[in-house]
Amino acid sequence: LCLTAAVRIGSIPAEAGPGMKDLAEARSLKLTAIGRRSGRPHTVQLWFVPHGEKIYLCTDDCQARDWCRNIRREPSVSLTAGDQTYRGRAKLVDDQQRRDELVRLRRERYRGAFMGMAKDFFEITLEDES
């Protein structure tokens, strides 16, 4: 993988805040969530899909991934791309039409790599940057 390539798949509104624009340029991000058992921050690096004013994360098996189980318990998260960190709130995407759209956007963004991982999606809404 070339981690320096600029990637812009998905629709980012012109009025989106600078945080959303910065995140959209990144190839991957670091998600920090609170551990559901330990109560301590737990960070993982993930691929993601920026779309609209949201960030979407996905996995192949939410029950097998600690980060998924952590954000289901405590949806407040932070996202880091480069040296910028943003706070947000996660929720599971349960609309099949939206998931189908996100699979397409992920396929375009990452050129089909690891598409088996695109089964469960979480939508992250960034908190106001003010």
Image: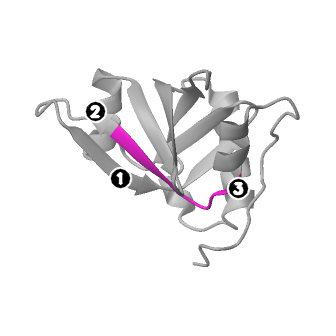
How many numbered discs, if any?
3
Give percent across and percent down for residue 115. Answer: 57, 60
Rendered residue at 80%/39% (across/down): 12
Q: Give the secondary structure at mark 3.
A: helix
Q: Give the secondary structure at mark 2.
A: helix
Rendered residue at 68%/48% (across/down): 22
Rendered residue at 64%/74% (across/down): 4
Mark 2 residue crowding within 10 angstroms, few (<14) / some (14–19) / many (20+): many
Distance CA(mark 3)–CA(mark 2): 26 Å
In the figure, 65 relative to 4: above or below? above
Mark in the foreground, 1 or 2: 1
Mark 3 residue crowding within 10 angstroms, few (<14) / some (14–19) / many (20+): some
Q: Is residue 127 left or right of residue 97?
A: left
Looking at the image, which residue sits at the far right?
Answer: 14
Amino acid marked by disc 2: Asn
Circles 1 and 2: CB distance less than 8 Å? no
Part of the protein shown in magenta? 25-32
Give percent across and percent down for residue 92. Answer: 48, 26
**Residue 27 on the magenta span:** yes
In the figure, 84 relative to 74: above or below? below
Is 119 in front, or is 42? 42
Quadrant of res 74: top left
Q: Is residue 26 left or right of residue 59?
A: right
Is 87 in front, or is 97? 87
Give percent across and percent down for residue 24. Answer: 69, 49
Which part of the image, by quadrant, shows the C terminus?
A: top right
Residue identified by numbered label 3: 25
Residue identified by numbered label 2: 70
Residue identified by numbered label 1: 44
Mark in the foreground, 3 or 2: 3
Going from the N terminus, do you reach mark 3 or mark 2 first?
3
